[in-house]
Structures are given as structure tokens and as C-alpha cells.
Image (spheres, coloured by chain):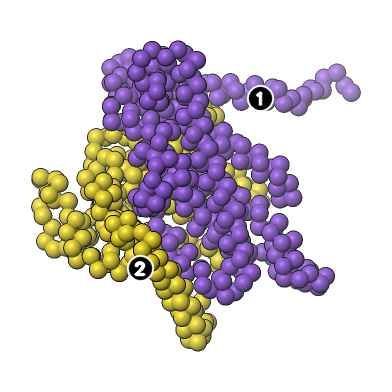
């Protein structure tokens, strides 16, 4: 991308502007023709104009008696966003690490694997949403059920993916390692693990979407903070302006999150060849 | 052949299957056993974590709660089983319809973006802009536009898949081996022919894999849409069980959702194998 000339970038940006303004234009036009009311589907100039008024709803301290009120609107927005983001990060990290660990252990100890794998395949297709009541029974409300659900959304998929990736490691790699006298453990730590991690990280990124969805639903059902609770509150009170603002915030945060993971992937998994990395975009 | 030589019999399909099922039974038995043991020792509260023998013991009582028509009164077993099947059918149908529309729609839009550069430049930024918005955030919009019933749930499945799969279509087209296109061009294929007869069959298998990976998200969004009351379905049962703290119903529903999700994946896999026979 660095070799792109400035002219190309400008043309690209102009097209971007035309595209977005066309989208917004159609929206505004159908609104001004009176096809629907602002209460129903507010166009951008209405819900963005209402932004200063709506920001106060990001502060959940009125709903939670123990909580200190936010110092400013900006503080409230930051608190709501970070509550959600922290849940996603903790859940994702736990799910990824434990998933890779479980998958490796299943292949490392054959008997243990044969005993555990059927239960994992049995639990894997249960949608995280179906776990919601169980999460509430086990952990009540607050951070824990949301983290638990994000964990579940990732854990089983990563476990099964780890097994599939381990089985797909090139036989040559293992043969070479064995010829050079590597032990079983060494083969797992120094050959198989670096070989499977890039693929797994990709799968994690693909499932970010599901994890992000599950945290919003967990917040809307069993929590009193975070973006999910905000959107549900807005929906229940019929505040369509707030719904739209919530959507914009969720979109921005989701986009940033994906970019950050992409960056982490490029930095941490430095041994992946460039060509392959570009294919996996 | 000397008499001492051991003849190693290759495992037949049946013996392999038998071996696998024994491990399968052992694994599930261990899992259920630990759970039952925790219950027996009094560590797992049967009101919150009822062990399998409790939540599977009165299926009909749980099945009664699946639909409001059977919730009161004393329906017969046949009626209850029928409403459970109808509830499962409603959810599954929404997923399948949404998936199909999204698959066809994203394939068409993705191909059109690459086929016509002007259309592409006009549409792609909007797709990129809307893609990271979680389907959950679309939920209020879906209900405002479509009200209740099947339409909002199908719309959400469509939203959950459309943007991801459009972007996947683009990346699949961009990563096709250039040799395919060159050969087609040397043989005198027009632009339309290249798109329909070279690019389309080349990307379909990959796109289908993306669809299968996203089945998980589609299945989840249907349950969520149903839980806020677009009318019936398994998602509503989940949320009823949460709101009434009916653990027995919750576990029974999880059981059903797991089975349905499992079979949906198998069906998609089978379609992939049969329909896309040219894939490696």
C-alpha cells in the first residue's frame, strides 16, 4: 500500500466521499419525501444533531445506586465503551489460551483425547445464547456472565480448530524434528505450536464478530453497563436517536477492534510469510 | 505363507465405527457422571444446575412451555411433541431462508462490484462502513421496519452474513490464480464469460466454507431476535427459562439447540460435498 501515489489516494478518497454521500443522500431524501417519520428511522442530520442531548444516557450511574456519576459526557462514553471492550478482551484471551491448550492436550495425550473429544464436539454446537440462562444462574449479573459467554463463543471453536490444525501440520516438519532427535514435548512446543498459531489467530479474528455479538446480548440481558445495555435501554424506551448513536459507536469500536487484532497478528506472528498474510486478509 | 506369520486384519468400517462409539459413550458417560456426582454430593444446586436425569426426566412438562397455546391446560403428549417440532421448525426456517438470501445476495453484489469498477467504487465504501456494525445493533431497526413475525428475524440473519460474505467474495476473486483468467482470455472468453464460467465456479467452494463458518453467528442472531419477541421460536423459550428461573427448561432447550445446530452443520457439509463436487 505504501507505493500508492498521492493521486491514486485522492481518487480513492473522492470515490469514498461520493459513495457515502450517496448513501446518506438517499436516506435523507426518502425522509424529506415523508416516507417515514423521524421517530421511526431518524436520518443522520437529526440523530447526529441530537448527539449533545443523548450523550448523558451513556452514564449508567442513575441506574446503579452505588456508582459514582461520570465527571463529563466524555467520561461516561469512555466508561461505557471500556466496560464492553474489557469484557470482550478478557473473554477472548481466556477462550483462545484455554482453547489452544485443550486442543493440544487432546492430541498430546491420546487416551485423554479420546475420552474428552466427544464431549467437546457435543457441547460445541450449542449456541452461546442458549448458555445465557446458565451463565446467569452461575454468575449472577455484572462482568462475569458476559465474560463467560464470550469465552464460550470462542473456546469450543478454537479447541476444535486447534485439533484440525494440528492434524494438518506438514508431515515433513514432524519428520525433520524427529530425525533431529526432538522429544514428543519439544515437537509440540517448537514445531507444532508455531505452525498452528497463525491459522488459529485467523479463526479468532473471524469469530470476533460472534464474540462481539455475544457480549452485547449478555449486557442487554444481564448487566447494567456497557453498549449492549445502552442499545437495549434505547430500544425499550423507543429512543431511536439513541439507537442510531449506539449503532454508530458499536460500528466504530468494532472496526477499531478488528484493525488492532490485524495489527497484533502481523506483529506477533512475524514468522508468517508476507504473501500468505496478504492472502488471508 | 508361513504359519507363524501374523495376519493383520485391516479394521473394517464396522469395527472402526464400534470403536469410536465406545469412546463416545465413555466420554459422555464421564461428563454426565461428574455432573451427577456433584449433584449427589450436594455441590450443584438442582434448582440451578439440574443433572441430566432430572432435566430429561420430565420432558413433556418442559415441552409444554414451548408455545403459549399449550402452556395452560392439559395437552396430550402428541400435541406437545408437535408444538416442540413446530418451534424448532420456525427457528430453523428463519435461519435457512436468511442464509440463502444472504448467500445469493452477497455473491451477486460481490461479483457486480468487481465486474463494474464504477459500481464497485460507489458501493464498496458503504459496505465497508456498515460491515463492522454488530447485528445486535440492527435489532431495533429491524423491529422498527419489519415489526414482528418472521421478517425481522430473517432480515437480521441476512445482515449478519451479507456484509461479511460480500467482503469474502471480493477477497476470493482477488486471490484467484491469475493463470485461470489468462487461459480464459487467450481462449477468447468475453468479460461476462470469464465472470460466469471461470470466476463463479472457482470462488463458490470457498464462499460456501465462509457460509458454514458463519452459520454459528446466524444461528445465534435468530435466537436473539426471537428472544426479544418477534414471535415464537427457540430463542423465546431460552429467555422464558431465564426470566422464570426454570433451569430444567433451560437445559432441555440447550440440548435441543445443540442438536439442531449440529444437524444444520452436517446438512451444510453434505450440500458442500454433493453440490460443489469440483472443489478439491
Residue A229 place in picture, x, y as percent:
26, 48
Q: Is residue A273 above or below residue A138?
A: below
Residue B85 place in picture, x, y as percent:
50, 25
Q: Residue furthest right?
A: B1
Report the side of A64 relative to A260 (left or right): left
Mark 2, residues whose alpha carbon is within 10 Å: few (<14), some, or many (≥20)?
few
Report the side of A232 relative to B100 (left or right): left
Residue B177 place in picture, x, y as percent:
69, 65
Of the chain colours in the picture, the one used for chain B is purple
For residue B245, what is the image quadrant?
A: top left
Looking at the rendered structure, which numbered label has been put on residue B141? none
Question: Is residue B43 in view?
Answer: no
Element carrying mark 1:
helix
Task: Please state the total of marks drawn on the protein image.
Answer: 2
Dot 2 corresponds to which residue?
A32
Dot 1 corresponds to which residue?
B17
Amino acid at each position: 500500500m505504501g507505493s500508492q501515489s498521492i493521486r491514486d489516494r485522492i481518487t480513492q478518497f473522492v470515490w469514498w466521499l461520493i459513495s457515502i454521500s450517496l448513501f446518506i443522500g438517499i436516506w435523507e431524501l426518502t425522509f424529506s419525501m415523508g416516507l417515514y417519520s423521524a421517530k421511526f428511522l431518524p436520518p443522520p442530520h437529526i440523530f447526529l444533531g441530537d448527539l449533545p442531548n443523548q450523550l448523558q444516557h451513556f452514564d449508567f450511574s442513575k441506574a446503579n445506586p452505588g456508582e459514582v456519576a461520570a465527571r463529563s459526557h466524555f467520561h461516561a462514553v469512555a466508561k461505557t465503551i471500556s466496560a464492553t471492550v474489557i469484557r470482550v478482551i478478557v473473554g477472548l484471551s481466556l477462550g483462545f489460551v484455554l482453547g489452544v491448550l485443550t486442543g493440544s492436550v487432546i492430541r498430546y495425550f491420546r487416551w485423554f483425547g479420546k475420552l474428552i473429544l466427544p464431549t467437546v464436539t457435543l457441547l460445541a454446537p450449542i449456541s452461546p445464547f442458549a448458555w445465557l440462562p446458565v451463565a446467569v444462574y452461575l454468575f449472577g449479573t455484572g462482568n462475569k456472565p458476559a465474560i463467560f459467554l464470550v469465552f464460550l463463543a470462542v473456546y469450543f471453536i478454537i479447541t476444535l480448530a486447534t485439533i484440525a490444525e494440528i492434524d494438518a501440520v506438514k508431515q515433513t516438519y514432524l519428520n525433520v524434528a524427529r530425525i533431529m532427535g526432538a522429544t514428543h514435548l519439544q515437537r509440540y512446543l517448537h514445531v507444532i505450536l508455531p505452525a498452528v498459531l497463525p491459522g488459529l489467530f485467523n479463526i479468532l479474528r473471524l469469530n470476533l464478530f460472534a464474540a462481539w455479538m455475544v457480549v452485547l446480548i449478555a449486557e442487554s440481558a444481564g448487566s447494567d453497563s456497557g453498549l449492549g445495555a445502552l442499545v437495549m435501554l434505547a430500544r425499550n424506551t423507543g429512543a431511536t436517536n439513541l439507537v442510531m448513536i449506539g449503532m454508530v459507536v458499536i460500528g466504530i469500536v468494532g472496526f477499531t477492534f478488528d484493525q488492532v487484532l490485524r495489527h497484533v497478528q502481523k506483529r506477533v506472528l512475524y514468522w508468517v510469510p508476507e504473501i500468505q498474510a496478504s492472502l488471508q486478509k | 505363507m508361513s504359519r507363524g506369520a501374523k495376519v493383520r486384519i485391516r479394521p473394517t468400517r464396522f469395527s472402526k465405527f464400534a470403536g469410536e462409539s465406545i469412546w463416545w459413550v465413555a466420554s459422555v458417560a464421564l461428563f454426565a457422571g461428574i455432573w451427577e456426582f456433584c449433584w449427589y454430593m450436594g455441590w450443584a444446586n438442582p434448582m440451578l444446575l439440574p443433572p441430566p436425569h432430572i432435566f430429561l426426566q420430565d420432558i413433556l412438562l418442559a415441552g409444554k412451555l414451548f408455545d403459549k397455546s399449550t402452556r395452560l391446560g392439559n395437552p396430550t403428549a402428541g400435541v406437545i411433541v408437535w408444538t416442540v417440532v413446530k418451534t424448532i421448525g420456525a427457528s430453523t426456517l428463519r435461519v435457512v431462508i436468511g442464509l440463502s438470501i444472504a448467500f445469493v445476495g452477497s455473491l451477486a453484489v460481490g461479483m457486480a462490484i468487481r465486474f463494474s469498477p464504477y459500481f464497485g467504487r460507489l458501493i464498496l465504501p458503504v459496505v465497508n462502513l456498515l460491515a463492522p456494525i454488530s447485528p445486535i445493533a440492527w435489532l431495533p431497526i429491524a423491529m422498527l421496519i419489519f415489526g414482528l413475525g418472521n421478517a425481522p428475524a430473517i432480515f437480521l440473519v441476512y445482515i449478519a452474513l451479507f456484509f461479511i460474505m460480500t467482503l469474502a467474495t471480493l477477497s476470493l476473486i482477488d486471490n484467484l490464480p491469475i493463470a485461470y483468467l489468462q487461459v480464459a482470455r487467450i481462449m477468447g472468453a468475453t468479460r461476462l464469460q470469464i465472470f460466469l464460467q471461470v470466476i463463479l465456479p472457482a470462488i463458490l467452494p470457498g464462499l460456501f466454507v465462509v457460509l458454514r463458518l458463519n452459520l454459528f453467528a446466524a444461528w445465534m442472531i435468530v435466537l436473539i431476535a426471537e428472544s426479544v419477541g418477534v414471535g415464537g421460536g427457540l430463542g423465546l423459550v431460552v429467555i422464558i427459562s431465564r426470566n422464570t428461573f426454570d433451569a430444567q427448561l433451560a437445559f432441555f432447550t440447550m440440548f435441543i439447540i445443540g442438536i439442531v445446530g449440529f444437524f444444520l452443520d452436517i446438512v451444510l457439509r453434505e450440500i458442500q460435498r454433493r453440490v460443489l463436487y469440483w472443489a478439491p
